[in-house]
Amino acid sequence: MVRDHTLRLALGAKSPGEILDAVLAAAPGTERIYVTAGAPWHADAERYPTLKDAVAAWLNSPSPRWTTATGRGKDRLAGHFVHQRQPVGRYAPAAQPDGDMVEIRSVGEWFDPSGADPATVRDAFRLLWQELRRHWSDAVLMGSPSQTGRDLWSRTIPTKGKWAGGYPVMSEELRGLLHATAGQGRTELITPPRVPAELPRLVEFDRTFAYAKHTWKSGVGAPQRVTARQFAAMDEKAQAKALMSCSHWHVKVTVPQG
């Protein structure tokens, strides 16, 4: 799909070289080609021991006009990405291997292939690009959602002001404590107060976000040590803040005789 025009191309056996030749002849300057139907990289898959081997063979099919791109510039990674179902082929003209790169990718990286007809894909990409441009005038769509997300995230990092030189992080000691004690275990509970011969139910809680909660709320910089005497000297508000914050407590208890 080129703007509002539809071009129908004869791609032959659909090797990477044939796809590149046909598309670039009809739409010069194309930087990325999404395959929206079928999986040409699975051609002759039965000849190979694994699907990954078949994909690698297809990506590296010999072509007199194209060679594997070495990569340069933003979002221009080197070489092919061999994936069983969503591979990425990166090619450059054989006569100019350091020239402009063209990618061949699966539209499955962005959309469910079963509903990814070319017109829908084009309109979705256009609307997403327009929405991004509302926030960043130079925003572009990268090859995949993850690459696009990393680019957008990098735009939120301050370049001036208080945090321009970087964000403070927790001390090595605190990071070690969190890693050792804020585990991701699962807790199984039964209905109190008594445990019958046959359990009435089993409730399972997944504490997957326990560690993330710690890293979100914990302080940065060197840890502050507070003794019992110092804690007792705090006012009620300061004590409540200390108790509610993510912290580690060392408590000694003496049990009286009898």
Image (cartoon, grey):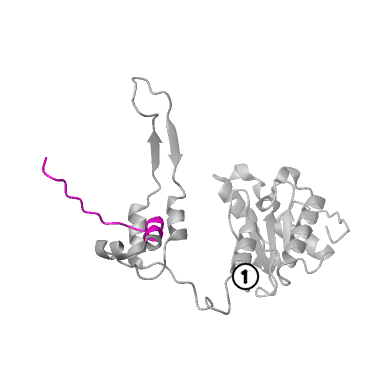
> Which residue is located at x 25 percent, y 64 percent?
229
Relative placement, left or right, of 37 versus 175 is right
Q: Residue furthest top?
A: 197
Label 1: how many residues lie within 10 Å, few (<14), some (14-19) or many (20+)? Answer: few
Q: Which residue lies furthest to the right in this view?
A: 5
Locate residue 74, reporting x and y percent.
Answer: 63, 71
Tell me the quadrant of the picture where the C terminus can be found: top left
Answer whether residue 31 is visible to the viewer in this image: no
Q: Which residue lies furthest to the left in this view?
A: 257
Q: Nearer the viewer, residue 29 or 43?
A: 29
- Report the residue marked by disc 1: 155
> Which residue is located at x 62 percent, y 48 percent?
85
> Which residue is located at x 53 percent, y 78 percent?
162
Q: Is residue 129 above or below residue 138?
A: above
Relative placement, left or right, of 244 versus 157 is left
Which corner quadrant of the image does residue 141 belong to? bottom right
Q: Which of 40 and 49 is in front in this view?
A: 40
Q: In this view, does 102 lie above or below 187?
A: below
Locate residue 155, reporting x and y percent.
Answer: 62, 70
Locate residue 199, reporting x and y percent.
Answer: 38, 23
Question: Main SS type for the magenta part?
Answer: loop
Q: Magenta segment range?
A: 239-258
Relative placement, left or right, of 242 versus 76 is left
